[in-house]
Image: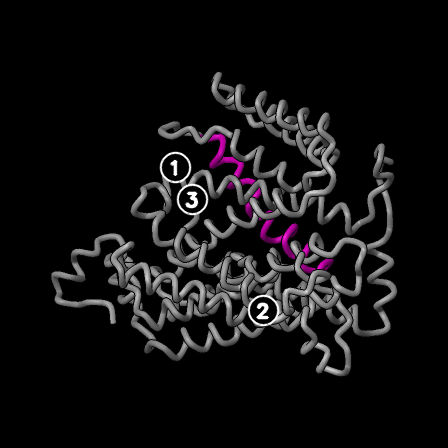
Amino acid sequence: MASTPKQIQAQEKLAGLVLIGAAALALVFANTGLAHHYHDLLAFKFGPSWPRFGQFSVEYWIVDGLMAIFFLLVGLEVKREWYEGRLATPEARRLPIIAALGGMAIPALVYLLVTGFSPPLQSGWAIPAATDIAFAIGVLAILGRYAPASIKLLLVTIAIVDDIGAVAIIALVYTADLNVLALAAALGTTAIMGTMSLYGVRKLTPFMIGFAILWFFTLASGVHATIAGVLAALTIPLGRGEKRSPLRKLEHDIHPWVMFLIVPVFGFAAAGVHVPSDMGAILSPLPLGIMLGLFVGKQLGIFGAIYVAIRFKLASHPHGARWRQIYGAAILCGIGFTMSLFIGKLAFPGNPEAVDAAKIGTLAGSLLSALVGFIVLRLGHPRPSANADIEEMRDVLHPRSKLEKGEVPD
């Protein structure tokens, strides 16, 4: 049975709170007498001994294993939205693509300027370019009616395009030495899964077996193993017009596991950084570049790109959204948490000090973006009545009704 809008909003709010709680718990562990237990847990090795890799630690299983399922969900959502959802038409794609490009380029530029283009730090340029959709949507869910449906729609579409960019960056930039044979096996597995889809296979079990095989070959190839999730998602049949779509069924089945287990577990594993008593440490180039990239770069890049696109008629103004609300959403896009922490681990391999500094910058920038974005949206518009939700949703779906009433976005 499909969830109601209220149920979906409650789930999003709870998922955001669980993620925040997991990150806070990690910070408590890492900054108390429990720190050694926390790090020992993440370093504990178990499972089979893989050729070339040996046994995986708990942290490795989370980052390279569980997060592949997270990226599987990302891929499923992107595919569905691209073919029959918010990104199904060129008109619908134009504004979020422009906004996401600005929201990736400007934070990266801010980071490079703050770090002085220092060669040892240049590999971290992509850390502030990412947006954590789960965290941002959680903040919007907490805001309730202060965050209208049009703003949530805008933020989600920008984040979807942002996810595509993040996946491309991980695949192209943060890839180790390639094992050509393993890469060929991964591509061959993807081709077989795609062929199954073309020839009418609709049971999910063969695709899940293929996903596991694809994950192993991708890991062995040197391309980050999480890319296997996106490749697998592209082969899952969307089944447009079918009563039981394999893609929608899989997305529905794994969504709660990802949002309430995998993402919080990753947050717990990634956010545990020792916060120095001298808070001046955040002013060092690496964490400061990430913090300013997320907080300043994201809002400048996204809001600026949207303004220019609308000003020069490259895209239309989001229906029912006021400029101050668009600005608030742009600030919330500076919550990089999950994706920024993930990319931070890839950017500085073998350099735990740099990884910890990147975590501090990510946490500071994400927290600042969440608080300021919340305040802008909370104070930027009076609380509407319950009936205003219906009115606002109708204006999003049928914008002509707003124009007929003589109203224009301010």
Q: Which corner quadrant of the image does residue 318 belong to?
A: bottom left
Q: Is residue 361 left or right of residue 163?
A: right
Q: Residue at x 84, y 56 (%)?
A: 41
Q: For residue 7, say whether it is visible.
A: no
> How many numbered circles are shown?
3
Residue 101 is situated, as x and y percent measured from the top left of the image, at: 45, 55
Q: Residue at x 53, y 58 (%)?
A: 131
Residue on which the image places disc 1: 83
Q: Is residue 169 magenta?
A: no
Q: Which corner quadrant of the image does residue 17 belong to?
A: bottom right
Residue on which the image places disc 2: 113
Disc 2 to disc 3, C-alpha distance: 48 Å
Along the polypeptide, which appears first: circle 1 or circle 3? 3
Residue 302 is situated, as x and y percent measured from the top left of the image, at: 43, 63
Is the C terminus in the top left, top right, bottom left or bottom right quadrant?
Answer: bottom left
In what element is the residue under mark 2? helix
Along the polypeptide, which appears first: circle 2 or circle 1? 1
Along the polypeptide, which appears first: circle 2 or circle 3? 3
Residue on which the image places disc 3: 2
Q: Are marks 2 and 3 in contact (CB under 8 Å)?
A: no
Residue span colored magenta? 245-270
**As shown in the figure, which amino acid type bears the numbered disc 2?**
Leu
Mark 2 Cα shell of 10 Å, populated few (<14), some (14-19), many (≥20) = some
In what element is the residue under mark 3? loop
Disc 2 to disc 1, C-alpha distance: 38 Å
Is the N terminus in the top left, top right, bottom left or bottom right quadrant?
Answer: top left
